[in-house]
Image: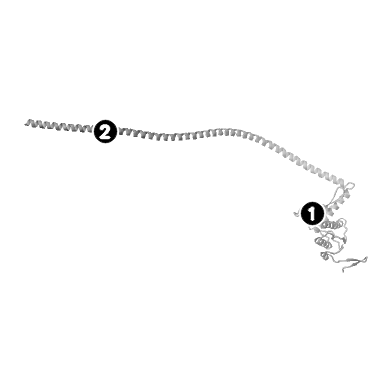
Amino acid sequence: HSHYELASEVSGGLKRALHLVEKTEAQYSTLQEVAAEKVDEQTKLEQELDEMRLGLAEKSMADKMKAAELALKSSRDDFATLSNDLQKAEQAYREASVLESTENAAKTEINSLENDSISSAAAYDALAHDVRQMEDVIRQLGEDRANAEQSSRTLVRLAEVFGPRGVQSFVLQNAVQALSSFSQVYLDLLSDDTLKLELALDTGDRISRTAYIRSPDGSWVDRPLSSLSGGQWRRCSLALSLGFTDLVANQRNIRSSLLVLDEPLTHLDATGRAQVGKILRRLLQKTDGSDTETANNKLTTIIMILQDLAAEELEESFDSIDVVIRDDGISRVVVDK
């Protein structure tokens, strides 16, 4: 019984052990299958991981390639810029070389010009010295010529004076000059210094007359005698007549106490007639013989013959006005008392 129980227990133990082994084998098989599945899963995961790694590597490589392309493009651009700058630098170098050559040529030319300038300055100084000497010679020759011309004029004048007609011409010329001066004094008073009459003696002993009119700017303009107005011509004629009385009084000491004027107011306006009256009044004013304007300082009576007395401004210039009346062929004088 004990052996049977022991055998039973052993048999039971074996069964349990076999069952455990089977169970264990089943679990092992299951575990192997699970492990195989896990291995497959791991393999798949490793493949997927490898694929992912490969994809990441390819993406990284693409990014790197893109970055490299960008860097290559930038490098090419930089190279092109550097090439352009290099060409510009070469061009600038060539231009600098040309400028340097030009500068050297200019310096050479300047040195040559400086040498020429020094030579020219020396030549200029020599020429200036010669010019000054020539100017001195010319000045001396001019003085000699002027002296010779003066001597020639003097000799010609002496020949004219002491020739057959020299004395007469000399006396006549002085008389003409004096007449011109005396007449101009009266003409200045008659024209308010707007007329001038010059008398001169030409080579043929003829008296030439030249009239001048003062222009608005104060200058004198010569005018032909034929272009003078009636009033201007009358002023010149009256001035010559009065100047001649002064000439005779000064050169021949002939002074008349009577002055007769026939129609001296023809063509004169009111201003001209008033000026004539003032001059005639001045001629009658007695002085001590030192009258600086006229030489008629012994004149006591002036008789003026007029066709009519149209100018009332002359009534105060005369002490008396006698009127000649002709009636039926008979003339009679109405004396102003």
Q: Amino acid at mark 1?
A: Ile
In the image, 1: left or right of 25?
Answer: left
Quadrant where the N terminus sits is top left
Q: Amino acid at mark 2?
A: Glu
Which residue is tagged 2?
37
**Residue 178 higher or lower than 136, as above or below:** below
User: How many circles with numbers are drawn on the protein?
Assistant: 2
Estimate the spatial distance between the alpha carbons at disc 1 and disc 2, rounded to whole Å. 149 Å
Quadrant where the C terminus sits is bottom right
Query: Nearest the camera: 125 or 268?
Result: 268
Q: Are marks 1 and 2 in contact (CB under 8 Å)?
A: no
Residue 292 on image: x %, y %: 81, 58
Q: Which mark is residue 319?
A: none
Query: Nearest the camera: 323 or 335?
Result: 323
**Residue 89 higher or lower than 317, as above or below:** above
Which residue is tagged 1?
213
Residue 77 on image: x %, y %: 47, 35
In the image, 285: left or right of 31?
Answer: right
Quadrant of residue 142 within the rendered picture: top right
